[in-house]
Amino acid sequence: MRYCESPFFYHRRKTREIFIGDPKNGGVVMGGDHPVVKQSMLTCDTMDTALCVKQTLELVAVGCQIVRITAPTVKDAANLQNIVRELRAQNCLVPIVADIHFKPDAAMEAVKWVEVVRVNPGNYADSKKFATKEYTDEQYAAELKRIEEKFTPLVLEAKKLKRALRIGTNHGSLSDRIMNRFGDTPLGMVESALEFAHIARKHDFHNFKFSMKSSNPKVMIECYRLLVARLEQEGADWNYPIHLGVTEAGEGEDGRIKSAIGIGSLLCDGLGDTIRVSLTEDSPREIEVCTDLLAQIPLLSNSKVKITEKDFPFDPFHFEKRETPKIELNENVKCGGEQLLRVVVTRATWEKVAPKIRPKDDVKPEAIYEDLNIFEIDPTQDFEINCETQLVTVKDGVNLPAITAFRLLASKLKKLGRNNPILLKDCINFEPVPLEPKIALLRASVVIGSLLADGIGDAILVRGEAGGGQSLRLAYNILQAAGCRSFKTDYVACPSCGRTLFNLQTVTARIKARTEHLKGVKIAIMGCIVNGPGEMADADFGYVGGAPNKINLYVGKTPIKFNIPEADAVERLVDLIKEHNKWGEPEAKEAATTH
């Protein structure tokens, strides 16, 4: 199976065109040769028509091309008529997507008023019980028939009204039936989506797209690769467009880095027809990141230098770190083998940050680039290497984008039978002027994050960010976002929508203020239960909206405490962390400010 024509040369995946509304009247054509479409989601109550209209207009003003609105009940879905009517009265023709979970009757109402209905196969026809059950082939077939009976009315209505559908699976919110046969895996996500696609095709309905979202960029990348490969297996006419996104990415730098790793990696491989960057921030900020990220892809993907190499230097469907021997970077630090991925800095950065480093700091340089015993290689040329314990990297100035160059290096080492440790660089060719920090962040995240998701890399060097301290912090943040190294608390935070039962931005800030010193602890902050228990299954603790002003606390995907008043919930979360021996007191403020 292959998910792209070549890991070394950019070919945009050729997808069929689908129509989001009437292209002659403000609609969008997606797929084919059309540019990647940017979208976002409202954060307000769907019953607040005026606020929904206001937020939609704000999104359109910054370049959003499709706007998603949650419809948790039939009543909410019916109010989409009022929202759309008011938007059209103000000459706003942006297509609207209704986001549906659990409620087929809400979908049947929403499809009357909006251009797209998004359904989640994991909960459209099933209620999540985390039940363990073995299905016989006959029982499984009966379940598929039941799903078809529930989904077919929406397909037929969408076909009649010329609407589009998004078949969107989420990691962690798969049905118990899929979980029991395939597990909570990329394969399970893909098979769940294909079941619904087969039903749509049975009725000659093709105006749909897929999404495969996860809060873990590596899982997300695997899911989309596997989806595209499976669609190729199904046949040439299964070339449906795909929507890219890392769900519950969080806020600030962390949210941007996770999104850039997941979305950027796939875009550089030619996948993706529409994207959303999910941030726990005001929605218009998502569009700015979408625009900036899309602008980097032509610079980071190889569409000019033809490379005849065809074999993948990594398994694209199952993450496995490339095996390398353990070597010394210096007298204090080793890399390769089972060692941590190491952070290398230039001497210029070392001189800037060294005076500020304290002995207990987790964020600190581990080696200086200029002092390393390193073999710099041009992978476009033949080379010989006689020692597997020699650290290698791509030589500066090579006429290739960094992702392509490092993949080619790994491929040629593999053909030589060598497993040398590799130092990754975010750039091998330099801009004439320093990059703007937000652009440096996105580029480094896409390049290094993509390669880490391939399993390539034993140490990393960030040079595109001109600031010494910022480049060091960025390197560690990329390692954390890629799941390669944990040096601080990790947060899974949803971006908010009309289902959210508390102010996510405020609560996230409050939780971070109490817990951000907890190295290696993962906390999920979820506005409601739609994706909560599943999406945060790999988190240590969860803070989930259970009812208005009431919070449920989880350990993993297991609910432990219910209906806690919101005013008390953060401290009860701290108590729960303490009960599970994951708590440590933060350093005194006086000590922290000496940094």
Image: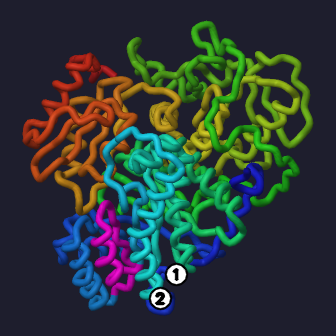
Residue 38 % position (x, y): 47, 68
Residue 19 badge: 1
Q: Which secondary structure, mark 2?
A: loop
Q: Nearer the viewer, residue 234 or 499?
A: 234
Q: Residue furthest top?
A: 331
Q: Which secondary structure, mark 1?
A: strand
Depicted 164 relative to depicted 290: above or below: below
Residue 455 badge: none
Q: Residue drawn 74% across and 41% down?
A: 407
Left or right: 11 in relation to 305: left
- The 10 Å Cα crowd at callout 2, few under 14, some 14 to 19, many 20 or more, is some
Identify which amino acid the numbered label 2 is placed on: Asp
Residue 590 % position (x, y): 22, 19
What's the distance in space between the residues labelled 2 and 1, CA to CA? 7 Å
Residue 22 badge: 2
Visible residue check, residue 261: no
The part of the chain drawn in magenta is: 92-115
Q: Nearer the viewer, residue 103 or 79?
A: 103
Left or right: 557 in relation to 452: left
Q: Residue drawn 41% across and 82% down?
A: 157
